[in-house]
Structures are given as structure tokens and as C-alpha cells.
Image: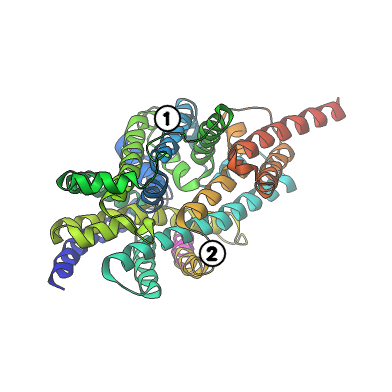
Amino acid sequence: MARIDIASLVFLSTLAVTFGAAFFARMRASQNGPDEELAGRRLNRWLIGLSAGTTGNSGFVVTGAVGLGYVGGAHWLMLAISWLVGDLVYWSIFPARLNRVARESRAITLSDMLTSNLNGKAAQAISFLVAAILVAFLSTYTAAQWLAGKKFLSGMFSFSDYTALLLFAGTIILYSTLGGFRGSIYTDFVQAIIRIVGTAIALAAVSWYAIADSDSFYRNIASAGPGFFELFPDSTTTSILGFILGYAAAAVGFGLGQPQIVSRYMAGSSPEETKRAMWIYIFFLQFTWLAMTAFGMILRGVMPGIADPEAGLSLFFRQNITPVVTGIIFADVFATIASTSNGILVVMAQTFVRNILPIGKKSAASEKIKITAVTFALGLVTIGLSMLLPGNVFSIAIDSVSEIAAGLAGAVMIKVLGWRHTAGSLLVAIIGGIGSALLWKALGYDAIFNEAGVGMLASITGSWIYSRWTSAQTA
């Protein structure tokens, strides 16, 4: 009991700092007045890169990545590397342009950006449809974060699943409601520092245990099978290319279609400063992702036979490591999951209030009150959803990310790159993208090539065909 109490004190001290950052953000927001929706669009490269990185990290990294490394071995290192390929393409083209377009159009949400300079019923349909897609799939993505948090708390403290879920989600909902968008940026920065320290400690600790009892480690690893350390066991050239290109496409789609990420680029102080966040973001994401997958691989040799490998991180530290270090890992895991959940809740609330609620008399004060209330309400809804969804953290998270990318990334690409479009062509792009992705997945082809890439291709092609057809009709 004393061990858990000391670890809890360390964890609670970091949680107090997180709430302090959210409270400070609330005070800053009150002082800055109406131009506050995106923190005044004054974020520097470090806030952009680390906030986007922690928001993108998600509970998958400390649960799903650990579990994949534990069960599947080195092959799952290629998931992060494939994602890197997509991120390199994405950062060379889009974040600076996203910032420029958002500043010129004064867009706050993705719906605002896509409908800028467009009018009519099709533009209204785009605004509502985009918001509905985001709220629907981001709700399941948030539910996956609550599942990851439940695994964390129940693994660390032996809470019941229900108690762990309510404690974890309730804490994050409270400080998300308190801090708003600026609060999510400040708390992300704090949590990024905790993440870097915690990741390094976790990898060093499990490696030390493997070296300390190397005979047992090698014996356990050998039982995992000969393909455990192969990057692509039993794969053809076609399947290897499909895996790499599919997840690279998903990374591009993730960067374009996830509003909790896009909003960080939209809030940059300039297109140039936004572009300079590239290597900060990429280093943070790759370091944490690869390290947690490697942790899972090494853990297979240290603690074989774990019933739920996604809970491996918390189980290892609870059983083997000193309470102070365990407390830091508590904070690390919480920070990883909380930063994503916090960012999603805030951006969902902004989208819901601005693009779904009936338009009435608007003021900065009334909109802030609505966003606060909706943030809290959506948090409660996603808690309920997490109790109903089948599957593990990885499957729920990757499905949600892929469907959003399929439906929205193509349309955002068209808008940001300035390709010819109308409200009608963008509507076709969105419907065609998500429809083709759902069909591709229903046919079972997503195991060969991620549906996000299929949806993006269908989206761009559909918009181009529609634009050509309407031009021919009016010629």
C-alpha cells in the first residue's frame, strides 16, 4: 500500500501542474477577449510541434503500440516508420498552407475552412456534413482513449473497470472544460515534457531487466517464434508495399482530416513559424512510438504470458520498479492519453457549436459558454460509448482515424492547394471518399491497403470528374 501511495503522490503532483496550466490558460483567455478561439493565432513552433505531437500520440502509443510489439514483434516497428514516410510528405506540403488559408479565411474549424468563399445549399450541407462526420468518428476515437485510460488505472491500482473509467475520463473532462483551446495547448506542452522523460525511463527500465536476467530473457523471446524479429515475416513484395504505402497515406490523411491536429497549425503565428515545427513534431512522435513498440518487444522476454498486452506498461512498473519512478510512469501514461482526449473534446465542442447548433445571436461570451457546456456533455456521451464499443484500443483508434481521413482529407487537400472546386464538387468529394472507404473495408481489403488512401483517391477523383462535368454543362 505504501508503494502505491508514494507513486500516487508523484502522479498527483504532475496532475496538479496540469490543472494549473489549464487554469492559467483560462485566465489568459479572459484577458485576451474575443480573438481567443485559436489562442489568438500566436503559437510558436515549440507549442505547435509539441502540442500537435502529444495530441496525435493518443492512448494507442502506451497501450496499442506496446501490445503490438509484445504480440507481433519487429513487424510493428514498420507501422511507425510507414507513418514517418507519410509525415515527411505531409509536412513538406501542407501545414504552412493550412495556416495561410485559415488566416485568410478567419476559419476556426475545418467546416469553416472548407466552406470559405462558397455559398448556397451545397455549402451549408458541407458545413453540417463535415461537422457530423467529425463528431461521430471523433467520439469513437475519444472512447478508445477512455478504454486506454481504463486499462492504465485498473492495471496500476486494481480498480474495477467501471471505477477506473469514470475516474480517468472524469478528470480529463474537468480540465478540458476548464481550459478550452488555449488550455489544451498549455497542458499539451507540460505533458510532452512528461512524455519524453517517461518514455526514456520506461525503455531503460525494461532493458535493464532484460540484461539483468539475460538467460531467462532469451529463453522467453525464443518462444515467441522465429518471425518475432523480422520486419515483414511471410510477406510478399506486394503486401509489403501495400502496408507501407497504405499507412503512409493514412498519415497524410490523419494530418489533413484530424481537426485536433489541424487546429494547431491553424493557430500558428505565421505560415513560416508553422513550417518550422516540422522536426519537433516528427521527433516527438517517432521517438515515443518506436520506443513504446520496442518496450513491448522487450517486455515479451521479461514478462511472458501477460493476458492483456495492452496493459503491459502499467503491469511492468507496478510489479518491478520503485514507487517514485512508477509515479513518473503513471504521469507519462496519463499525459499521453489525456492530451489527445483533451484536444479532441475541445475541437469537437468548437465544431458542434459553430457548425451544428442552430445559428442564433452570437457573441464571444455566449459562444464560450456553449463550448464549455458542450465539452462537458460530449465527454459524458463518449464515456457511455466506450462501454458499448467492441474491439481493442488499436482497432477502434485506427478505424476512426482512417474513416475521417477518407472522408475529409481529400476535400481539405483540394481547398488548401487551391485546386478548382465548387461547393458541389467538395460535397461529392466528401461523400465519395467516406463511401468508398466504408465499401473497401466491408469487402475486407483494408488488410491489404488502408482505406484512408482509397477514400482520399476517390475523393479527389470524384471532385475532378464533377468539376469537369459541370464545366461541360455550362459551356
Residue at image coords 43%, 64% = 372
Residue type, label 1: Pro
Give the Cα distance between marks 1 and 2.
Answer: 39 Å
Residue at image coords 51%, 55% = 396
Indicate the position of residue 287 as horizontal and vertical percent values. 31, 38
Q: Nearer the viewer, residue 336 or 133?
A: 336
Q: Is residue 398 visible?
A: yes
Dot 2: what SS?
Answer: loop
Q: Where does the C terminus fall, quadrant-wise?
A: top right
Indicate the position of residue 119 as horizontal and vertical percent values. 70, 43
How many marks on residues? Answer: 2
Within 10 Å of disc 1 (Cα), the crowding (few <14, some 14-19, many 20+) is: many
Looking at the rendering, which quadrant does residue 355 occupy? bottom right
Q: Nearer the viewer, residue 12 or 74?
A: 74
Within 10 Å of disc 2 (Cα), the crowding (few <14, some 14-19, many 20+) is: few
Indicate the position of residue 327 as horizontal and vertical percent values. 19, 59
Image mark for residue 389: 2
Task: Name which of mark 1 and mark 2 comes first in the sequence.
Answer: 1
Residue at image coords 39%, 43% = 225
Relative horizontal placement of residue 282, taking residue 142 as reference (left or right): left
Indicate the position of residue 53 as horizontal and vertical percent values. 36, 42
Asked whether 8 falls inside the magenta stretch, the response is no
> What is the span of residues highlighted in magenta in the rendered image?
363-373
Badge 1 vs badge 2, beta-carbon distance below 8 Å = no
Relative horizontal placement of residue 217, taking residue 242 as reference (left or right): left
Looking at the rendering, which quadrant does residue 228 occupy? top left
Q: Is residue 25 visible?
A: no
Residue type, label 2: Leu
Residue corresponding to mark 1: 271
- Secondary structure character of the magenta stretch overall: helix
Residue at image coords 34%, 48% = 185
